[in-house]
Image: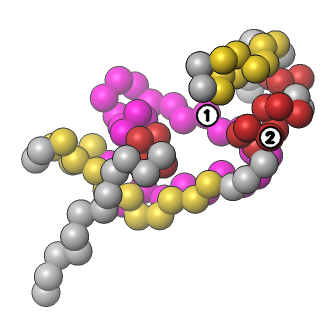
Amino acid sequence: MSFSQRLAVLVSGKKIADGKPEDVVRDPEVVRAYLASSISIENVHAAYGAVRVIEDVSIKVNAGETVTLLGTNGNGKSTLMKCVMASCTRPPAASS
């Protein structure tokens, strides 16, 4: 299954690659910018006021992997990416 016929990659607002996904993911500048390290988050929770948008999400993306996050509007994709970029904090654990 293919999700895209073309892939453009930006770093700090500058396009560093554009082309077929299978070519772009091998571009040395793309590898250096995005694919050289792994990312892992565990048990992420996020809310906007009383509305919980992410509950107990864990994800690991290994070095060299390209992952697509799918979901309809309002299902937490952007919020999850903000959490990955350390913009969210975990709520305090409930006291017993």
Residue that extends furthest to the bottom in the rendered view of this protein: 96
**Image quarter of residue 72:** top left
Tell me what residue is drawn at x 44 percent, y 30 percent. Answer: 71
Residue holding disc 1? 68
Q: Residue at x 76, y 20 (%)?
A: 16
How far apart in space, not on screen, are marks 2 and 1 (Cα)? 19 Å
- Identify whether 48 is placed above or below 8: below
The tag on residue 58 is none
Would residue 17 appear left or right of 9 to someone viewing this image?
Answer: right
Q: Secondary structure at mark 2?
A: helix
**Can residue 4 be seen by looking at this rendering?**
no
- Name the residue beneath numbered marker 2: 32
Q: For the N terminus, give its image quadrant.
A: top right
Q: Is residue 36 magenta?
A: no
Q: Which residues are magenta?
A: 54-80
Amino acid beneath label 1:
Thr
Determine if the magenta segment contains residue 65.
yes
Q: Amino acid at mark 2?
A: Arg
The quadrant of the rendering that contains the C terminus is bottom left
Residue at 14% in and 82% down:
95
